[in-house]
Image (spheres, helix red, strand yellow):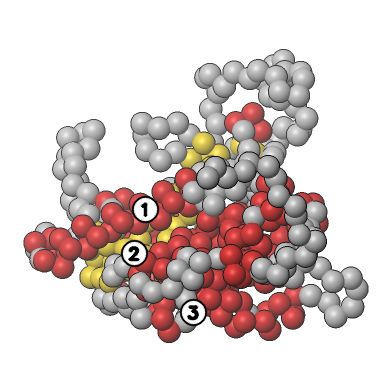
Amino acid sequence: MRGSDRPGEGALFSYVSAEARVPASHPLRLIRAVVDEALDAMSAEFEALYSRVGRPSVPPEKLIRALLLQAFFSIRSERQLMQQLDYNLLFRWFVGLSMDAPVWDATTFSKNRDRLLEADITRKLLAAVLAQPRVAALMSDEHFSVDGTLIQAWASHKSFKPRDMPAQDGGGDDPPSGRNAERDFRGEKRSNETHASTTDPDARLARKSNNTAAILAYAGHVLMENRHGLVAQEQLTHATGRAEREAALVLLDRQAGGRTLAADRGYDTQGFVAAVVARGMAPHIARDVHASKTGRLRHSAVPEALTRTEGYLSSQRIRKRIEEVFGWIKQSAGLRQTRHRGIGRVAAVFSLAVTAYNLIRLPKLLGQPAT
């Protein structure tokens, strides 16, 4: 018998909760359990952040869960996130909203989000997730890899002007007029020492290699453990020529331990290799041996005998997985170009994206749904 396509009469009341709609084997169940445990451990942090008087704000626990969903599902804006929360039962369940609970205004949500970003909550969230026994059991405390990437700033080349030039001046003999006027930079020498962005002064002009274009950017760095490829530490800094090596040492000191450190050849300098050895770790770093423009052969700081060991070869093979971290946070979490300005807020968003990357890996690594 053919079924009818006529809309049925809607019931006045529904007795099915959002909890019942989510399958027991859904990956978000395990992620929700890990996130809830981390948020419970951060309760004292939230108490110190909010006043005991005044109107209730967006609960920080719900706000963080919503921001994680935004990274998980590549939602481009807070306004689209609020739309999804309005009708998506899975999202409502994960955030902790009942079926009848109203969704926040996008502007109100953004203002409450900024409060958390400025309080370094996202980095503490990463630490709380990694501190859980079932997560810590997945991670190696001996073998690590380090690398960095450029995060494009929310600023254009037109905003990169001489530091002694008035903000309203477009540069050149005849400043261009209009809100988005054309600008020709040909023949103009520009550097971070003489120029700065009027849109985001913390951004720096940088490029990934000699064959790529320079962009206004920040530098994001991660320290990955080599057992399962989870991120153990993260850092966001100004994009400078020494940022990767300087940040790597900061991450090592924060991790406090380890036997080996793998990295690409950009880290092969006398100073960095000596600093790694001084911390009791073997420098499993790709050797940078090439002929300079003068024809002289550059000598690597990594001992050649070390490169023939099985451990070195294994580290060099595994370290390439760190590119998966950068690929995911840029493509899925939306950090190819940040939508925030200022190194503090960008650092907080970067830390949240790294935490989201670790969380999406957990259901498969733990191999069982939460109950």
Q: Secondary structure at mark 1?
A: helix
Can you give x and y, in whole percent of width and height, for residue 192 in the image?
Answer: 56, 40
Q: Which residue is mark 1?
A: 324
Q: Residues within 10 Å of mark 1 (few under 14, many from 20)?
A: few
Q: Position of residue 233 (x, y in %)?
A: 45, 68
Q: Nearer the viewer, residue 207 or 46?
A: 46
- Three-letter amino acid code of the residue under disc 1: Glu
Task: Answer whether labels 2 and 1 touch (C-beta < 8 Å).
Answer: yes
Q: Which residue is identified by label 3?
A: 371
- Marks 3/2: CA distance? 26 Å
Per the image, label 2 sits on a secondary structure element best described as loop
Q: Is residue 364 left or right of residue 347?
A: left
Q: Which residue is mark 2?
A: 229
For mark 3, give the secondary structure: loop
Disc with the residue nearer the chain's start (1 vs 3) = 1
Q: Residue at x 66, y 51 (%)?
A: 84
Residue 207 visible, this orientation: yes
Residue 139: quarter of image: bottom left
Residue closest to the eye, 239 or 66: 66
Q: Label 3 is placed on what type of residue?
A: Thr
- The answer to whether residue 246 is above or below residue 131 is above
At x 55%, y 65%, the residue is 22
